[in-house]
Amino acid sequence: MIEVVPSSWDGHGAQLRLRPPRALTRRQFVMLFGALSGAMWIVAMLGWWGGNAFAPAFALLHSAIVATALRTLWRSGERGEEIRVGPDAVEVVTSGAGVVFRAHPYWVRLCIERGSEGISLASSGRRVRVGDFLGPAERRELADTLQDLLAAASGRNR
């Protein structure tokens, strides 16, 4: 998901917030876990009733594995990036590492890799990939938006 926000740098420039797409809300994730574990526990209790003494133990283990997998999946969706394009600087800020790239907009190059459709910003020998978690259509939109913002910030669109 790409969200364009006007920058706080004297009203010039913009800020792009990138987040991975999510199909479910937190409540829906909890309901999904409840449905999966509920169905599993019903089957486990039927197995226990039929004579399988280990069915509840395996159901408990399976519940823990499903809960861990869903929690890991949810946490991976919390990552994000911010790309700030202003008249004095281009910054890339990630949710985990803070500012990972900073350069003057005149010297920043937008690099688009056609084979893997990767997008990166480069300046002075440093390069940072952006939007890796976006889908192909969103990456094309990001490339177009970044190209316009960089041209406007560096004065190349005049």
Image (cartoon, rainbow, N blue to C red):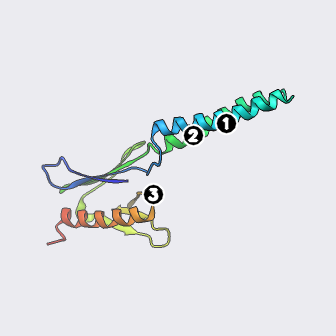
Q: Position of residue 126 (x, y in %)?
A: 38, 59
Is 73 in front, or is 49? 49
Residue beneath label 2, please? 70
Q: Is residue 60 above or below residue 6?
A: above
Residue at the (49%, 39%) spot, across then down:
28
Residue, x 63% and y 38% (percent of image)?
Answer: 36
In the rendered view, tell whether residue 72 sits above or below residue 147: above
Gap between marks 1 and 3 measured at Cα: 36 Å
> Around disc 2, counting alpha carbons within 10 Å, would you say few (fewer than 14), some (14 to 19), or many (20 or more)?
some
Q: Amino acid at mark 2?
A: Leu
**Label 2, label 1: how many angstroms apart (C-alpha)?**
16 Å
Residue 115 appears anywhere in the view:
yes
Q: Which mark's residue is nearer the viewer, 1 or 3? A: 1
Label ID, residue 39 = 1
* Residue 13 horizontal side relative to residue 32, left or right: left
Q: Upstream in the sequence, badge 1 or badge 3?
A: 1
Mark nearer the N terminus (2 vs 3): 2
